[in-house]
Image (cartoon, rainbow, N blue to C red):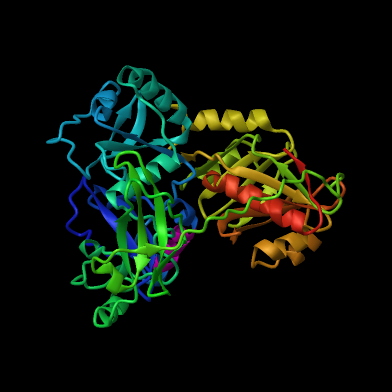
Amino acid sequence: MYTARYANLKIGMSRYGLMLDESGVVVDDGVVGRLGAESFYFTTTTGNSATLFREFGRLATWWGLSVGLANLTGHYCAFNLAGPDSRAVLAEHTALDLTDEAFPYLAIREGLIAGAPCRIMRVGFVGELGYEIHVPADYAVDVWRALHASGSRFQLQTFGVEAQRMLRLEKGHIIVGQDTDGVTNALEIDVSWALRMDKPFFIGQRSLSILQKQPRRQTLVGFSLPPEAPLSPRESHLVLSAGEIAGRVTSAGWSPTLARCIGLALVTPTLAAGQKLRIRIDKLETGSGSASSGRGDPAGARLRLEDLSRRERFGCKGPAAEAWLTAAGLAVPSAPNSAQVDAGGVLVARLGLAEFLVEAVDGGTERVESAWRQLGSALRPAEVYPVARADLVIGIGGAHLNLLLRQICSVDFAPRLESCAADFGAVTLTSMIGVGVVAFIRGGSDREPVLTLWVDPSFAHYFWTTLLEVGRDLGAVAVNE
């Protein structure tokens, strides 16, 4: 899957991971850390996590590999503590040895921070001494507040994505999907240090071997403008040579550190050989129209969206999970990819042979809370393992439900919409608008089918806003948040 070599990666260390498709085009990158002899923890770009998880599973099955995969994206929170004093701030909340000798650059460690179990990666995307702190979502707020409280003595400040992007730009680090596109191969972005062409195999290796013998189509280069330059380029502004298009700007911005505009651009090899770039900068900008909040279907007869995330839920897995759920008085479906709602209003969805989602859908909140408390206590039964579920949960109904599904998903839900029951039915694990979802259809109180979607919270904002846009394009949508 990745272009680097990991067989020789030491336990407790990490390495940059670059992923290509069969044609050698860059599709993702991240960091791969080795936790044990046969245990790895790796990160991907945010937008690709669900897609890559499915692809890893598909290839593991296809290649017949004995490997277990777990997508932790929705269960962990991650933030970056960076800067000259980051080690001093972190040292106040952990017993881990943070010295350079014990915790070198690119190391990964597991330990407690402010009493919470964490995985800490010493990586430098922003160009400073820094630590990526990965913590179970339930502990995230407590860890964040603890670091903030002690960091006030060091003038600790929060920083967002835009600041992070400028810091990485000053270091020349790329963002896949911004500094690359759907045809950019690994040879064009100067990452030869991440390519181990002598490996027995990685996806895209054969294509790169062929491309190495051919002239480059484009090359990623850095540029900077004089401090007194009156205009600054923006992403996608054209690079010109002799009146012809010779490339485009991929990233650009004002650097406070360098006091000038800097950026990255994909240009022809001729321009990449040290020539000055001529960038055409548009002087006009177009503004967006005012948003309309009017609704043409206030009752939601056509389409209704409801945020159901406040419902109590949890997940569990393990060889004894089914027996434990049954002993707890819950109705457990016998077949994988099915769900059942018992008389007390608790839904149990069987996502695999030994993996379950439990949610209070029509009452039953106390029963779900009680079961979850037992899983988190010393009374937890053997071979039953808790899985935190912080999903975005959406209920969708209305006459345009099937029309909406045809717009956002390749699965034909029409037969299930026509034959759905109130208390049981099939569970579908699929992708909608590029995001992995769990889908379940049941009959509502008026016998109208209602679709429930469980969505990874990492994609909550994107999924919800895109769903609203599609619904409005279909005529109208009523929203109950």
Q: Is residue 131 left or right of residue 246?
A: left
Q: Does the stretch in magenta take in 57? A: yes
Q: x%, y% of residue 91?
A: 25, 24
Q: Which image quarter is the N terminus in?
A: bottom left
Residue in the picture at 27% in, 29% down: 86
Judge by depth and name the residue closer to the eye, 250 or 58. Answer: 250
Please tell me whether residue 71 is drawn above or below residue 249 in the rendered image: above
Q: x%, y% of residue 69?
A: 40, 55
Judge by depth and name the residue closer to the eye, 233 or 266. Answer: 233
How many numbered callouts? 0
Q: Does the stretch in magenta take in 211? A: no
Residue range (magenta): 51-59
Please tell me whether residue 135 is drawn above or below residue 123 in the rendered image: above
Residue in the picture at 84% in, 52% down: 448
Q: Residue furthest left?
A: 101
Q: x%, y% of residue 74?
A: 49, 44
Judge by depth and name the residue closer to the eye, 419 or 466. Answer: 466
Residue 345 visible in the snapshot: yes
Q: Is residue 468 left or right of residue 49?
A: right
Residue in the picture at 40% in, 52% down: 252
Q: Is residue 373 left or right of residue 341?
A: left
Residue in the picture at 20% in, 42% down: 105
Residue 383 visible in the snapshot: no
